[in-house]
Image (spheres, rainbow, N blue to C red):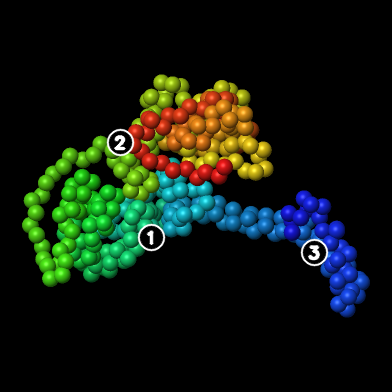
Amino acid sequence: MAAWKRKGGLEHYHQRIVTGMLERGYDQEFAESIFAQIQGFGEYGFPESHSASFALLVYASAWLKCHEPAAFLCALLNSQPMGFYSPSQLVQDAKRHQVRVLPVDVAISNWDSTLEGDGSMAPVRLGLSLVRGMREESAARIEAARAVLAFSSVNDLANRSRLDRHDLQVLAAANALASLSGNRREALWQAVAAVPDKDLLWATTREEETLEFAAPGEGEEIVNDYRSTGLTLNRHPVALLRERLDAKKIFAASKLATYPNNRLARACGIVTVRQRPGTANGVLFITLEDETGQVNVIVWPSLVEKFRKEALGAALLAVYGVWQREGEVRHLVANRLVDLTHLLGGLATASRNFH
């Protein structure tokens, strides 16, 4: 009804509504008062009630994020998928606010993410639901078997939880077997060897020679983290590129936050959000994330056309432009866009795109 205002409001329905009510036995005064209420709701009621309810949600969310940041993170992770914010963004923000986040661990994790301990700063244990390819019924069997007796090895896990090759491989890829098997490479080797036999031999154990593999490097770990869970608890990927970005005089988000108004500036980060609202007349809003925070970028329509490939396709984007700051409102108005996705190597990121 509020949208009808764009077409001239409800006035042209006056005769139809009032006349219809009179024909059905209502008096003129009552019919006019009903129409006035409908008209008032159409023009003001919905926006006011909507804004009031939204304000309440924002206040409650802000209070929780401020006073119970770990519980706030845990709840949002268990509500995925939702809104603009991916698990990676939520975890990165929480870590910047001193929330401890613990990895998925088959010896501890439930299907949902959980709080370990009491208090507003209790660490958050990531749940098995974040592991790509993990099946909830398999997780339920893991929880049930673990409640009886802690797992002693990957073989023990596989046999008592009746996990198949798929289950074991996705757990190993997510480094969720680390407490039982060592590093990711060793876990993948043991996962293959631990696939249970079927039928009468399922409960038997096999003696396998333990092989030691060198642990993956940090870059490889981060790539595998993103591939298996969509996030990493290691350093932010952009942190590994900071020296190269500094050489290009590309600033971190934390430095830009204190930058003066109307100065030339450069930023670079993983693209997490692209927005182009219908009411923005073609303006594209991009959010970049680096190891220190986020940078909001404004790209005018003419620049979108000039740098369309970079604006709409880059996973790692460098922006050259003018820094604008008014109070706590800060953004970078783009003059030039550069696609630096190649610096990410095999890292697979995802952004929320609303063109």
- The residue located at (15%, 70%) in the rendering is 199
Labelled disc at residue 339 = none
Identify residue for label 2. Answer: 219
Q: Earlier in the sequence, mark 3 or mark 2?
A: 3
Q: Report helix, strand or loop for mark 3.
A: helix
Judge whether 239 appears above or below 52 on screen.
above
Identify residue for label 3. Answer: 38
Q: Is residue 169 left or right of residue 72?
A: left
Identify residue for label 1. Answer: 112
Q: Position of residue 242 (x, y in %)?
A: 39, 28
Which quadrant is home to the C terminus? top right
The local crowd at label 1, few if under 14, some if 14 to 19, many if 20 or more residues have their Cα within 10 Å, is some
- What residue type is disc 2 on? Gly
- What residue type is disc 3 on? Ile
Between the C-alphas of marks 3 and 2, the distance is 61 Å
Q: Earlier in the sequence, mark 1 or mark 3?
A: 3
- What residue type is disc 1 on? Asp
Q: Earlier in the sequence, mark 2 or mark 1?
A: 1
